[in-house]
Amino acid sequence: MKPTVRLVLVTALRDRLFASLLGLEAVVLAAALFVGDSLFFEAKASALVFAAGAARVAVVLGVTIFVGFHIERLYDTREIEAILSRTISRGGFIVSYWMGLIAVTAVFIFPVVCFIAVFHMSGAGAVWWSVSLILECGIVLAFAMCVGIILERAIPTVFATAAFYALARLVSFLLGIVDNGNLQEINRATNPAMEAVSMVMPRLDLFCQTNWLVYGFGPQDQLYVMPLQAALYVPLLLFMAIFDLRRKDF
């Protein structure tokens, strides 16, 4: 597994992913400090919330783009055939590749966590926010890998993962429409669809809640849901990727 993890890290370094995404994070965090200094009320809280939310999206989308184009290159250059011709199994390749992506993502999560550790207003909330960010990235990366292995193309992989991430973050909004929307003809048709989507999608809206950084978490926050969802969706998505890769004839 170590060679595959090393491959991912070396590729990220060669493609200048570290320099570009860390630079973007620096711009986001600097902009957050600027916005915070320009406000008269709740300056520190506003800067913290803006920085955490923007940096989270930048990390998720940045690594997703890398996954899509890297997997496409593995297929186009037939590098994946050379890797699988060695002693590593196809299941072992998928798992180690995901672990390599987690290692890359940890590099980008670290400065965000350091920023939060300096400016946090709730210690327990900052810890849970950081943990939930790692779990959220694990789920999104597993989905991106699964789609990339199946489709073998970067653009649809990036678009599908972005749509998955946006929809998973909007599950509570969809459920709110179902519960509080007017029962018109279109609602009778769309409400069952929304309920079905909410049943199969991970509840990423429960992850990385920026209010934890300011006010901490309360008894209404179901923190156990986050590790449970990661334990459910990551193995499921990785199994789907392994199943599709075993079907391919190289």
Image (spheres, helix red, strand yellow):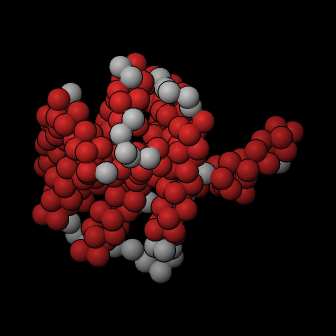
Residue 151 visible somewhere in the drawing? yes
Percent position of residue 118, x then y: 12, 63
Res 8 quadrant in image: top left
Percent position of residue 23, x then y: 14, 36
Res 97 quadrant in image: top left
Please give the name of the residue rendered at 83% of the width and 40% of the height, measured from the top-left corner.
189
Report the side of 229 relative to 73 (left or right).
right
Please give the name of the residue rendered at 49% of the width and 34% of the height, measured from the top-left corner.
149
Percent position of residue 139, x then y: 46, 52
Report the side of 21 relative to 239 (left or right).
left
Please give the name of the residue rendered at 87% of the width and 39% of the height, measured from the top-left corner.
185
Q: Does 51 sit above or below residue 7?
A: below
**Viewer-nearest residue: 27 or 226:** 226
**Viewer-nearest residue: 198 or 233:** 233
Please give the name of the residue rendered at 34% of the width and 58% of the height, measured from the top-left corner.
134
Total numbered circles: 0
Residue closest to the far bottom: 219
Res 67 quadrant in image: top left
**Viewer-nearest residue: 119 or 137:** 137
Residue 98 visible somewhere in the drawing? no
Q: Does 209 sit above or below residue 81?
A: below
Percent position of residue 38, x then y: 15, 45
Report the side of 55 relative to 192 (left or right).
left
**Viewer-nearest residue: 72 or 206:** 72
Q: Does 238 sit above or below residue 20?
A: below
